[in-house]
């Protein structure tokens, strides 16, 4: 089928490339010419394993192109997927201005019947509004015939770092349509993927995305809550999680306690769902609890360290890991970014290391003086530890995971470690003479 995709960020680009990979004829549209030039040169604007190889192969096969010309791209598409951003507004709601802009361009450009599919995460009811919006802006045709344009929902469940695999081998594809015509088109688009398709109404599909993300966020906050209690009663959250995960009703994923969730989805989607509830006079107490626990959890280790050290002034502090999780260069919602300003304000001399997120962090916190303290960036994880009086672990990158107790003991001036991801062997650290603090572990 001839498919156009609006937006070449995480959602749009990965979807477009994967549709081409499954044999469709795809045009990716972005308003930013520099980005289109980059894509045409075979480079992806995001750090995602396997994506550039697929971009090259499908471009060579003639199934994938990029353009800023939305008129040409939308004009004769059979389906147009919208994958633009819906960032968080100050009141917690989702900003739909990019969606509205694309919807208007679609209305002005299409020349044949077409299904518009929203992949971006949008509040329940948005697809209906987008459909009305497009109809309002559809120009009258010379032949008097009205074009058939419907809007369907097809939420995206990919996680950063595994985006291509999550799309090509998704556990399920959720399609939300309110007509057999729209459902038929989406079934045809996804047939070559050979994946289970869950077909529901548009509003249910919109809700599935929020409900699924919030459930995962809730799971993490619940484990963090239990971890905090474990510390107080002398239990160990890793042992507790091990005892829980074998129960298939609970499952083994997202039971990892630590310094909380970050990223471009969970922090934003929890607030957006809570906001949607408030708009409809319903207080989502579980979601609010997940948000509150996560907010506190992010700075838990900083507060522990401040109590232990009394002052950070002039103390060399190693910060290992900046991104919100390994396998990405994304700093959005990253716990490290909540802690670095606090450390600098308190006069710490931070040496940070991250294999992918350092450049982005440098733009926010350039090397030099800041607050009472200062920050510099190390070339390796071991260099960051040299002479440090305390160390915080915020992201479980492989090179950080593979540090041994001896690395901390021998390189740090005082081997005092705050592990926000619960990744080290507590007893081995103790035996090596490292003072080790984690989340929800036995003291
Ligand atoms: C998430 C969802 O997984 C994905 O389905 C959705 O489409 C977008 O949001 P992503 O943000 O890429 O994907 O990352 P994910 O791997 O889910 O991790 C999110 C955050 O939760 C990270 O900060 C991670 O460190 C944290 N996390 C995850 C925990 O703290 N504990 C866990 O057990 C799992």
Image: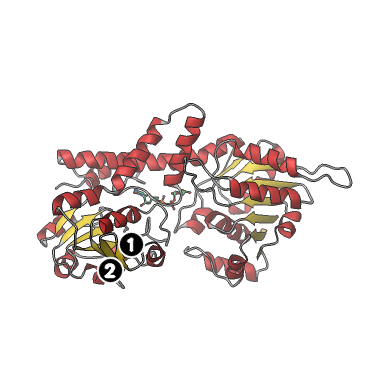
Q: CA distance from mark 2 to mark 1?
A: 10 Å
Q: Is residue 109 visible?
A: yes
Image coordinates for residue 278, horizontal then vertical, percent: 47, 31
Identify which residue, 147 or 235, lies in the foreground.
147
Instruction: Indicate the secondary structure of the residue bearing disc 1.
Output: loop
Image quadrant where one finds the N terminus: bottom right
Query: Is disc 2 in contact with disc 1, using a CB cutoff of under 8 Å?
Result: yes
Specify whether 273 is left or right of 191.
left
Mark 2 nearby-residue class (10 Å; few <14, some 14–19, many ≥20)? many
Residue 397's disc number? 1
Identify which residue, 140 or 195, lies in the foreground.
140
Residue at screen point 69% across, 48% down: 104
Foreground disc of the pair 2, 1: 2
Identify which residue, 298 or 225, lies in the foreground.
298
Q: Is residue 248 visible?
A: no
Image coordinates for residue 421, horizontal then vertical, percent: 28, 53
Specify whether 200 is left or right of 340.
right
Image coordinates for residue 389, horizontal then vertical, percent: 17, 63
Q: Which residue is mark 2?
A: 381
């Amino acid at each position: 089928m001839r498919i156009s995709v609006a937006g070449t960020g995480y959602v749009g680009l990965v979807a477009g490339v994967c549709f081409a990979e499954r044999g469709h004829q795809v045009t990716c549209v972005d308003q930013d010419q520099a980005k289109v030039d980059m894509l045409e040169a075979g480079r992806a604007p995001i750090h995602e394993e396997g994506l550039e190889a697929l971009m090259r192969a499908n471009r060579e096969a003639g199934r994938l192109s990029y353009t800023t010309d939305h008129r040409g791209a939308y004009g004769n598409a059979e389906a147009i997927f919208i994958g633009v951003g819906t960032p968080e507004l100050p009141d917690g709601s989702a900003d739909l201005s990019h969606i509205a802009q694309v919807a208007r361009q679609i209305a002005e450009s299409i020349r044949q019947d077409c299904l518009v599919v929203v992949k971006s995460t949008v509040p329940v009811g948005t697809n209906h509004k987008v459909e009305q919006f497009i109809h309002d802006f559809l120009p009258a045709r010379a032949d008097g015939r009205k074009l058939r344009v419907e809007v369907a929902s097809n939420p995206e469940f990919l996680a950063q770092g595994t985006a291509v695999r999550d799309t090509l081998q998704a556990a399920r594809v959720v399609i939300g349509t309110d007509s057999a015509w729209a459902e038929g088109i989406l079934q045809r688009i996804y047939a070559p993927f050979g994946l289970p398709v869950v077909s529901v109404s548009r509003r249910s599909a919109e809700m599935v995305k929020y409900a699924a993300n919030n459930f995962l966020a809730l799971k993490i906050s619940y484990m963090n809550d239990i971890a905090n209690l474990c510390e107080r009663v002398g239990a160990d959250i890793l042992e507790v999680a091990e005892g829980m995960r074998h129960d298939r009703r609970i499952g083994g994923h997202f039971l990892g306690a630590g310094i909380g969730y970050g990223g471009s989805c969970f922090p934003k989607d929890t607030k957006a769902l809570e906001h949607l509830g408030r708009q409809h006079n319903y207080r989502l107490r579980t979601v609010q609890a997940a948000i509150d626990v996560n907010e506190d959890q992010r700075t838990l280790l900083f507060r522990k360290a401040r109590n232990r050290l009394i002052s950070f002034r002039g103390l060399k502090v190693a910060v290992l890991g900046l991104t919100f999780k390994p396998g990405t260069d994304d700093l959005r919602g990253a716990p490290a970014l909540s802690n670095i300003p606090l450390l600098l304000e308190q006069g710490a001399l931070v040496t940070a290391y991250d294999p992918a997120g350092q450049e982005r962090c440098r733009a926010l916190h350039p090397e030099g003086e800041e607050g009472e303290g200062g920050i510099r960036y190390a070339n390796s994880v071991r260099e960051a530890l040299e002479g440090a009086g305390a160390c915080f672990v915020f992201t479980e990158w492989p090179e950080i995971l593979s540090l041994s107790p001896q690395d901390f003991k021998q390189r740090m001036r005082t081997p005092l470690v705050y592990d926000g991801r619960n990744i080290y062997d507590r007893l081995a650290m103790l035996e090596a003479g490292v003072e080790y603090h984690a989340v929800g572990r036995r003291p």
